Amino acid sequence: MIAEIGHFALILALAVALVQATIPLIGASRGNATWMALSGPTSTAQVLLIGISFAALMHAYVTSDFSVMNVAQNSHTDKPMLYKVAGVWGNHEGSLLLWITILALFGFAVTLFGRNLPPGLKSRALAVQAMITVGFLLFILLTSNPFARLEPPPINGSGLNPLLQDPGLAFHPPLLYLGYVGFSMAFSFAIAALIEGRVDAAWARWVRPWTLAAWVFLTCGIALGSWWAYYELGWGGWWYWDPVENASFMPWLAGTALLHSAVVVEKRDALKSWTILLAITAFGLSLLGTFLVRSGVITSVHAFATDPARGVFILGLLVVAIGGSFLLYALRAPTLKTGGLFAPLSREGALLLNNVLMATGAGTVLLGTLYPLFADALDLGKVSVGPPFFNSVFLPLMVPMVLAMGIGPLMSWKRGDLAGALSRLKVAAIVALIVAIVTWVAQGGSLGPWWAAAGMGLAVWLLLGTLTELAERTRLFRVPVGQSLLRLGKLPRAAWGMTLTHAGLAVFIAGMTASSAWKVESVQSQKIGETVTVAGYAFTLKTVQDVQGPNYIASRGTFEVTKDGAHFAVMQPQKRSYKMPPMPTTEAAIETTFLGDVYAVVGDASSDGGYVTRLYFNPLVVWMWFGTAMMVFGGLVSLSDRRHRIGAPTRAPTHVPANSVKA
Amino acid sequence: MKRLVLGLALILVPPAYAADPSEMLKDPVLEKQAEALGKELRCLVCQNESIEDSNADLARDLRIIVRERMAKGESPEQVKQYVVDRYGDYVLLNPPFKGTTLVLWLGPFALLLLGVAAAFAFFRRRGASGGPVPAAPLSAEEKRRLETLLKDKDQ
């Protein structure tokens, strides 16, 4: 009964979405206020209806209602409660329902916070949101009904893929989807602006915080997925250039570019048409990401279902959504008024450079991800595009990017002074060079990978460049220190956000470089009592015991690890065998230190009476997570800036209009 | 559903016991070379995994072939050629630079050039068009709001 209510609520939501996608749009073009106002109650109705539907599926999972096919195929009574709840989105149908639930929440947020938005823009944007909802609801109802019943119901379910049975599942998909779907805000407002033919600072002021919020979620989601892969897949890697990872990375790159170009629209009323294009691209890539993952075109850990009908449907949806928006863009963008002028060497110019490089990066990842498909379709033969390609093409693109990141913030708007900026960065450049040379020498000249020295140098350059900018802002060493501190306290939070995020990226680059270049790995058959030394850590295998989990049995190895003769840690990795579905997984044991992760994996018994063990030392891994956390925190700080606060116009009315006057 | 689970199980076999110690070459230098080569060879039945990372039977067989040939004194290049002759370019995770992959390898640079050219054209056009374009005029309602706000500010 409850499942049917959930199903019915989805059908009602479709009807409401159809109304919301049409009536307010017609109202806006005819200037009919009543019709336009309809977008408010309809988006509220949608969030309620889709919420009911989501709750109904959640109920089926929590109560293990195996008469619902989706639950029977993906759950099991033995599964811990956390995974019953998270299991709702650990499958194709449920994850789509989560997608659309988040979409409805965003639509509702427009109604909730957007009271001060111009009614035309608001109702058009909400109508565009509803069009996306219609597409996805049709997709769910026609090809992926999560509420389909099973007759007769099985005694128990098939269980959830053990790799997904991890707290990561509870957070990684929702955060990722909050990011993907968050870009729908920028998209809907971009389309609405194209229909209206007007983009101004007020538009950018509304779009910026939402894009920033989406970016924060997406960054969190990607980092969490990466961390999850790092500890769960058990071979010490954290990024594989897997098509599915690429699918989430492309919108991130486009979203980062959008974030920066929206600044130019808001502050300088320039780059409008380009910003609109980026908004469409960022969400287009989010849709493409959903398509790549869900259609089964690229099968991987994330492809819960491979069904051609679904693939064709999503492809159609993609063509209509992206093709339609680009067509609208081609027709309407030339009518957008161009705004403020600026010289190539200026803050705007630097942000434009960021955009060119980010967009090229996103294009490169797109090309590499889709090339095997195209080559196959065009009969060019089967090609694999793996990590070596991405590393050798994508990473060099990011070098000028990081170099420019040090300089850009020191340039002034309109017309910057490159020579002046460079002279202020002298210290940063010299220290970065020294670090690069020291790294080069420390790893034995030509012996180590040459790029490690470059990576460390770039990290230092970016960190010091960012700090230089902070020092400039506070006039450090030019006025008394007390006055500098006072200035520091008065910096707008958006400035702090930039400093934190850029510095976070510097820390991340250092961690990424070190963990890729100086990873120490040792694979061997180890007998009980035997000691293996990896990077100065002595691992003694004490015991291997069988332990019983809620829905698995595991053999648990116990290592005593010493460093320089002193006790360091007792590490207990596991090799689990899940009962339903039957499948082995590894649970690595990780001890994190400031300088690196000590990482141990235990495997099967080997023929000589020992156990296969894999021991790693992964340098500076925690720097990557910390750097990412800084980036996320920076985004949040920036989001808390009074001027960025969502709905800020309501509380601080002098602000927005004061700016729209300038525009 | 059974097929799906089985399919997933095939794809997802965790690689913890890939590269079993018994397969490894005694000579650490040669083993390092074999590993570096293995990282560039695709496990043909897996998704985007190298033979070093996968524990599928096929990946295991390939690992052993690579090591046997290297132990016999073949260079990594020769072994790579041998594997490519048997399985085609598909086995290479780093696609070779040739006619059919021109778009792939040159595409990113073309994109970058396109971006730079577009930015260049943008500045040329802006330079030619002269002074700033006036902003769109305010609508009647916006003017009203502006006036009330300005009044608020005075208070």
Image: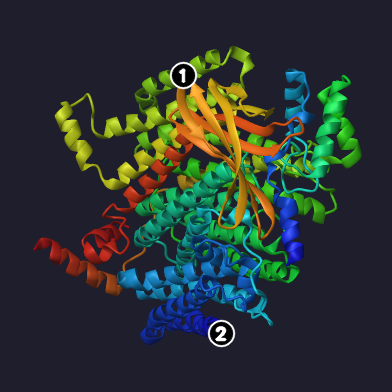
Front residue of A6 and A13: A6
**Colour setup of the view:** rainbow
Q: Is residue A247 visible?
A: no
Q: Where residue B62 sits in the image (x, y, percent)? A: 83, 36
Image quarter in which the C terminus of chain A is found? bottom left
Label 2 marks a residue whose chain is A
Front residue of A149 and B95: A149
The quadrant where residue A298 appears: bottom right
* Mark number, residue A135: none
How packed mark 1 is, by other alpha carbons closer than 10 Å (few <14, some 14-19, many 20 or more), is many
- Helix, strand or loop at mark 2: helix
Q: Is residue A4 visible?
A: yes
- Disc 1: which residue: A435
Residue A230 falls left or right of residue B60: left
Q: Where residue A515 sits in the image (x, y, percent)? A: 55, 31
* Mark number, residue A4: 2
